[in-house]
Image: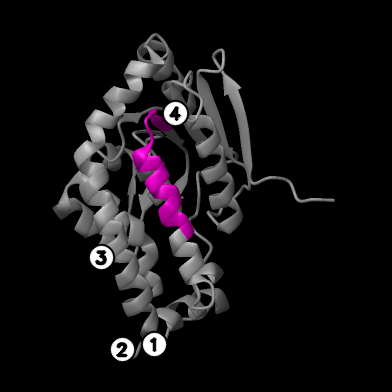
Amino acid sequence: MTAASPLRVWRECDGKLLRLRLSRPKANIVDAEMIAALDDALAEGIADRHLCAVLLDAEGSHFSFGASVPEHLPETCAAMIRSLDRLILRMVRSPVPILVAVRGQCLGGGLEVACGGHLVFATPDSRFGQPEIQLGVFAAAASCLLPERIGRAQAEDLLISGRSITGQEAAAMQLVNTVSDDPEAAALAYFNQHLAPCSASSLRFAVRAARVGMVKRVEVNLAAVEELYLDGLMSTHDAVEGLRAFIDKRPPQWRDE
């Protein structure tokens, strides 16, 4: 017997809307299997010229607790970082808008995936954060995406503190586009009112035009940050110690090296 897919995939609205749902509650961890499933579903869906949008949400009470911490360890981190970066680039380059509906926790790799989308809908009490620094590492993709969405000053606050903010606070930062008690319904209403009536062909040109500068910057910055993470950070004691301490459920013993 094969394990169930970590991602539910289906179509709605006469095939114009691709629905993707993270389906490994409660944590919906963005691990290698989830990343591959998302990447494959997006690649196939975007190839359909009739598609007008993607709606990404999650089963359960939380969008995602983040990436797999064990996959960040030295023996697997290169494959993990590179596969996540490929997914993020596919999302950033997507010629159809990706709507993201968030409930509960949206942390770490989960927030990076959300930031790869175009519009984010969230509950007022949802929680957004990049806590990687508290584990002795940094949020690689978010270091490129957050400054694009919310500006450098606010991005640096979240990236270097690791603190979390509510959906309401995220909206004030413009990380979230719409706050709603039912973000899935809000995203569907947006699609039905604003996207479904459009020419799918013309919509693709509009989406690409809106992101043309951003795509180029993210491509360059992701490559630089990936090198910094793999060749710099992961050669230090503290990065590995922080990850192992989290897995072992003990306080880290920092050496500052």
Going from the N terminus, do you reach mark 3 or mark 1 first?
3
Q: Is residue 95 magenta?
A: yes
Front label number (2 vs 4) = 2
Does dot 4 land on a helix, a strand or a loop? helix
Going from the N terminus, do you reach mark 2 or mark 3 first?
3
Which amino acid is tagged 3?
A: Ile
Query: In x, y percent, where is residue 223?
Result: 31, 61
Residue 149 in view of the camera: no
Q: CA distance from mark 1 to mark 4?
A: 41 Å
Q: Which segment did they paint magenta?
A: 83-99
Extreme-top residue of the structure = 197
Q: Is residue 199 magenta?
A: no
Going from the N terminus, do you reach mark 2 or mark 1 first?
1
On the image, numbered disc 2 is attached to which residue? 257
The disc at residue 183 is 4
Which amino acid is tagged 2?
A: Glu
Going from the N terminus, do you reach mark 1 or mark 4 first?
4
Do the residues bearing badges 1 and 4 touch, measured as CB atoms within 8 Å? no
Query: In x, y percent, where is residue 164?
Result: 34, 54
On the image, numbered disc 3 is attached to which residue? 160
Q: CA distance from mark 2 to mark 3?
A: 17 Å
On the image, numbered disc 1 is attached to which residue? 237
Do the residues bearing badges 2 and 1 touch, measured as CB atoms within 8 Å? yes
Which amino acid is tagged 1?
A: His
Residue at the image point whose x is 55% and y is 29% from the top: 19
Going from the N terminus, do you reach mark 2 or mark 4 first?
4
Q: CA distance from mark 4 to mark 3?
A: 28 Å
Observer-nearest of 36 and 43 = 43
Does dot 1 land on a helix, a strand or a loop? helix
